[in-house]
Amino acid sequence: MGADISMYRPEFLSRRFMPRISALGFRDLNEYLAFAGRNDNERRAARRRLLVPTTEFFRNRDVFEAFFGILKKPPFSERKKLTILSAPCSTGEEAASLAISCFQNSIDARIVALDRSLPSLRLAASGKYSKKALSKLDKNEIKRYFKEDGPHRTLEDGILKNVFPLCCDLGSELPLKTVDAVFMRNFFIYLTDDAQKAVIGKVKKVLADCGLLVLGKVERLRMDPAEWKTVDLESRIYMFRRGGR
Ligand SMILES: C[S@@+](CC[C@H](N)C(=O)[O-])C[C@H]1O[C@@H](n2cnc3c(N)ncnc32)[C@H](O)[C@@H]1O
């Protein structure tokens, strides 16, 4: 699958793969992966098991409200154009939600939507969603920000133009210069402690001084208070202090 599975927690791998491994009668994950490597359908299924592409529009709406409350104040309100990273973005619902919120709050921003899954990114780039995927939006939001497209709805061009899909493995360096904020939710739970530290290290390299990091509510990371100021504990929003202060 081209993925380094050593970054994922063994309990997570076991939970995701053991039922399939047992059903097919393999002894362990290595035997199963060797088989999946020779079989296109199984490889696709294995990739989905590893990558968990679940996401939704405005997941934890209160977090979006808290985040945009912060963006409307200095230093962010003084910046010309913001760059916000949604990583991993899966099929793009989080990135689209950020783009919609920026529009609603008159904030000029580009949203970089990063994931290692190309099929997920293709969906994010198309902005085309099923009615089921839109179930977390209210009718007015759907009417205002989506166009009818057969059985689907497509994000309005004015919103989609601010979403920039980027294929990247979070085990590698982030191919970005500076970002003002990073949404990194529902990802660290899958990673080993070492991999969590390594990914945070990569985020620190690209996050601007006083930049924001938004973690998922389920994440169990302990943020070093010398480097990260807790801005909103409930919403898991942290401000990066380069060099520690
Ligand atoms: C549960 S989704 C989270 C989506 C979104 N952040 C949210 O909270 O709704 C997990 C995503 O992580 C991506 N992913 C898993 N491992 C990755 C890696 N090593 N590099 C980049 N993306 C990865 C998967 O492709 C999947 O889209």
Image: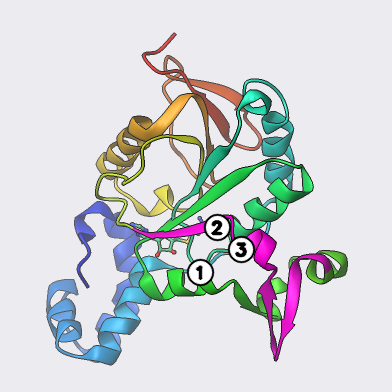
Q: CA distance from mark 1 to mark 2?
A: 8 Å
Percent coordinates x, y for residue 104 in the rendering: 78, 48
In the image, residue 37 above or below residue 88: below
Disc 1 and disc 2 in contact, CB within 8 angstroms: yes
In the image, residue 178 above or below residue 64: above
Disc 3 and disc 2 in contact, CB within 8 angstroms: yes
Q: Amino acid at mark 1?
A: Ala
Element class at badge 2? strand
Q: Indicate left or right for 78 with 203 as reference.
A: right
Q: Indicate left or right for 17 with 72 as reference.
A: left
Percent coordinates x, y for residue 146 in the rendering: 74, 71
Element class at badge 3? helix
Residue situated in front as seen by the camera: 127 or 131: 127
In the picture of the structure, the residue carrying the numbered disc 3 is 160
Give the label on residue 163, or none: 2
Q: Amino acid at mark 3?
A: Leu
Where, quadrant-wise, is the N terminus in this rendering? bottom left
Give the label on residue 125, or none: 1
Residue 161 is one of the magenta-drawn residues: yes
In the image, residue 211 above or below residue 39: above
